[in-house]
Every structure is written in structure tokens, then in C-alpha cells.
Amino acid sequence: MKVMQFVGRATILLTGLILGCGDTPAPSTADKPKVKSDGAKPAAEESSTNAVAAKPKKQQFQPVQLGGDAGGTAGASGSSADKPKLTGEKRSRAVISALQPLQVLLGDWRWITNKEFGGSKKAAEDLKWVWDFQTDEAQPSLTAKSEAHPYFAQIWLTYLPDDERFQTTARAPDGQQRVFRGTWTEGGEPKEESDGKKVQHTFKMQLSQVSPSDGDQWQLVLSQLDNNQYLMNLTRRPATGKQYGPLDVVRQQRLGTSFAVADSDNPGPKCIISGGLGTMSVSYKGKSYPVCCSGCAAAFNDDPEKWLAKLAARDKAKKSADE
């Protein structure tokens, strides 16, 4: 069963990358830390003698840039140079389509670390996920904030059509930023795991750090479970090391129920921006329109005419295709 088919069933809900609808509008570009677009991959390992003698480079904190080519190259499916680059509305719709399996992450989540801080595990119920169409309309993302999370104060998850990979941009509480890229493991097929009591279907996405390319390097393995939980497995390789070691496992549990997916089992009103299930509405010139979260509502209210024109164009194209 493919990822898109799996999330389309109302009886099975995927779950919090580390995502109801949040109350915080998507931040402006100025509020976000741009990713260094140097296209470099992590440097090769130095010998143990040189590694001990070398001084770690100081980390550079830069603003978030969702698209671009912040380290890394095209995906394994082929060189991006062989394919035409998607731009504008075509790029935006391709990103939205690729993020549909993660649409159910919209909402409120409780999280708890496995690692102890000051003698106890850290936990909170402040993780909220919404769509972000305001930072870069051609490169939409799913974004979430947390005031208490020890690793990520804000995180953005998007898709790079040219590379055919997902990208996660994470800003730590101290301002440091890391950019990760990767994709689903097992080709997007669920893995059956059992604890002796029940069988769990797990989808996993593995992402490796591409920026900064110096200093310690992190990896993320995001495991979507079918019981409204999400695991973020963090591993780290020291700047002078060769092996990744465990850093933490952050378990996230949904608060309430997700109704973010609109499909044949749960058609409902579709969000006029993301295509997800409309759980709230916005109004313009006496008419109401469904949206799936406060992020989409904020984008619509910024420029209603633009989004209504996009909706009309999609409806016209669909009508022409059906004829």
C-alpha cells in the first residue's frame, strides 16, 4: 500500500514531524533564519590526528530559505539537469501534491523526549502545525512552532520537485539552523512491526543534514505510526567523529482527532488552497470558502482575489479534462 493510499483511509491516521489547525499565522520571510546555497556536501572525514588538531569552525546562523539548492544534489532518480525546472503555480501544486501524505499532521500535538534534562524528560503540548503559503508562494511548506522544544523552536517541511526529495529546515532555540534532505524509506511502503500485542504499520522518512556542512552532523528518521503518534529519532555525528550515535527520540501524540484529509472516504468540503479537508471557513464579498487551517486562512486573507483566481483556473482545467 503506497503512502498516498494509506493516508487516504479515514480509519487510519498518520501522525506529529515532528502536525486541528494552529492559531499562529505563518511568519514572514524576515522572521525566518536563508540557507547557505553553496551546493556543498558534508566534507570528507579527516584522519584522527588532523581531526584532533583542527579547531571546529564557528556555526553561521542564516535566514531560512525553503527552496533553492542549499547543499546536496539531485535525487537518485536522475539529474535535475535532465528535466525542466518547475516554477510558479506549477511548482506550488507539485509541492502541495507531494506533501499530501503529511496533510494529516496539521493540528496540535503533545511531545516528550526520551532524554532527560536536569533529571527529567522534557514535555509540552505546544506543538502546532499549519500550512505556510506566505513565505514563498511557489515553495509552500508545513510549519510548526514550539516554545519549549529542546531541539527545534520552529520547523518547516517542504518538497523539492527538481530534486524529488523532501527538505526540512529546523531552527533551534539558540538560533542555530540545520537543513535536512531525504525521502521515504522502503519506497513509501509501510513496515509492519509488532510489540507482541498489536501490529503497527510504520512509514519512515530519513533525512540527512546538508547545511551547515561543517561541525557536528545530524540525521532525522521520522516514523509515522497509525495510532496518532509520530516518532522523531535524532542521531548525531561529532565534527571529529566517523559514526552517528543516538541523540534522542521525541515521541509525539496527537491532541484530539485529525480531519485534515479529504478523500473518497471523507469527501467533505475541500480547502480552496491546500486541497485538504476544510475544517474552518473564510469570507469574502459575502461568500464563505473552506480552508483547512489558520495558515491557509492567513494566506487567503492576504489576497482573496489571487486565491479565487487560482481556484477558478483549477476548476476550469478539471472541467476541460473531464470533457
Image (cartoon, rainbow, N blue to C red):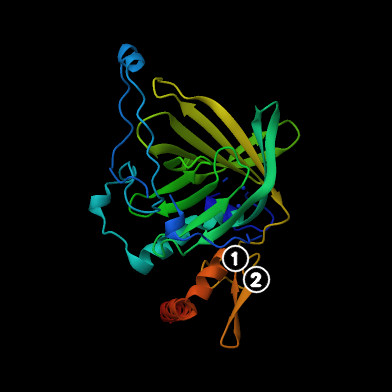
Q: Say which residue appears at 59% left-offset and 55% top-offset.
A: 129
> x and y percent of residue 81 in the render?
23, 51
Q: Say which residue appears at 29% left-offset and 38% top-offset.
A: 40
Q: Is residue 168 left or right of residue 146?
A: left
Q: Which residue is mark 1?
A: 294
227 to 96, vertically: above or below: above
Marks 1 and 2 in Cβ contact (< 8 Å)? yes
179 to 20, vertically: above or below: above
* Separation of residues labelled 1 and 2 (CA atoms): 8 Å
Q: What's the amino acid at mark 2? A: Met
Q: Residue furthest left?
A: 81
> x and y percent of residue 135 in the render?
44, 61
227 to 239, vertically: above or below: below
Q: Which residue is mark 2?
A: 280
> x and y percent of residue 82 in the render?
23, 52
Instruction: Report helix, strand or loop for mark 1.
Output: helix
